[in-house]
Image: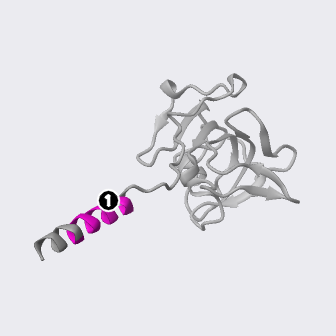
């Protein structure tokens, strides 16, 4: 009987260990990502948030600071780490958005915190705070592959709830 107990204990241990040895994919990190030189990413000059989003003010604005639940406006370029642009919003009309409502990817919102009108900021978003392990597609074409670190170049034009044309 003790052999049976030993065998049962051994099988339970092996089964439990197998459960702990997960084959789930790991998220990419900003630190372990190679960026295209054209993006001008400089982690040593960037600020890292507690959750792994990096940001760097290229131009520090002099206007109001962006605030949650406030109408704000910006121009932006969005890139994959290899330099491929997957989205943009250019002049003359800025994109309208409101932070704190869950309409933007979480890492992007985190990267905007503390930004001032008139500023230009680079934001690096890890996949865990972007689209995760899901491909983003348009008409069956993958626009953002799963597990992608994203790079945003943002110019904030208004954070005072105006019409998007405020200048600092």
Residue drawn where x is 39% and y is 55% of the image:
21
Residue 22: % across, % down: 43, 56
Answer above or below: position of 50 versus 11. Answer: above
Residue 50: % across, % down: 40, 46
Residue drawn where x is 65% and y is 25% of the image:
40
Answer above or below: position of 124 versus 136. Answer: above
Q: Is residue 109 left or right of residue 7?
A: right
Residue drawn where x is 51% and y is 31% of the image:
46
Element marked by disc 1: helix
Q: Single out the residue that lies furthest toward the bottom.
A: 1
Is there any visible trace of residue 65 in the rendered image? no
Along the viewing direction, whichever of 168 and 125 lies nearer the viewer:
125
Answer above or below: position of 63 versus 60. Answer: below
* Figure quadrant of the N terminus: bottom left
Q: Is residue 22 left or right of residue 70?
A: left
Q: Which residue is mark 1?
A: 17
Residue 148: % across, % down: 64, 45
Q: Is residue 87 left or right of residue 139?
A: left
* Figure quadrant of the C terminus: top right
Along the viewing direction, whichever of 19 and 51 lies nearer the viewer:
19
Answer above or below: position of 130 versus 2. Answer: above
Q: Main secondary structure of the magenta part?
A: helix
Residue 126: % across, % down: 56, 46
Residue drawn where x is 61% and y is 48% of the image:
147
The residue carrying pointer 1 sits among few (fewer than 14), some (14 to 19) or many (20 or more) residues within 10 Å by Cα, namely few
Is there any visible trace of residue 116 in the rendered image? yes
Per the rendered image, the range of residues in magenta is 8-19
Tell whether position 94 is magenta. no
């Amino acid at each position: 009987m003790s052999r049976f107990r030993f065998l049962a204990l051994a099988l339970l241990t092996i089964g439990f260990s197998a459960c702990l040895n997960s084959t789930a994919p790991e998220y990419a990190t900003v630190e372990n990502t190679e960026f295209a030189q054209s993006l001008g990413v400089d982690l040593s000059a960037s600020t890292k948030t507690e959750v792994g989003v990096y940001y760097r003010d290229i131009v520090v604005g002099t206007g109001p600071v962006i605030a949650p639940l406030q109408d704000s406006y910006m121009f932006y370029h969005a890139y994959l780490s290899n330099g491929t642009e997957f989205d943009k919003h250019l002049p003359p009309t800025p994109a309208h958005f409101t932070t704190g409502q869950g309409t933007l990817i979480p890492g992007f919102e985190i990267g905007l915190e503390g930004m001032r009108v008139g500023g230009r900021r680079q934001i690096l978003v890890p996949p865990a705070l972007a689209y995760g392990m899901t491909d983003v597609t348009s008409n069956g074409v993958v626009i953002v592959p799963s597990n992608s670190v994203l790079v945003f170049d943002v110019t904030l034009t208004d954070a005072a709830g105006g019409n998007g044309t405020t200048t600092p």
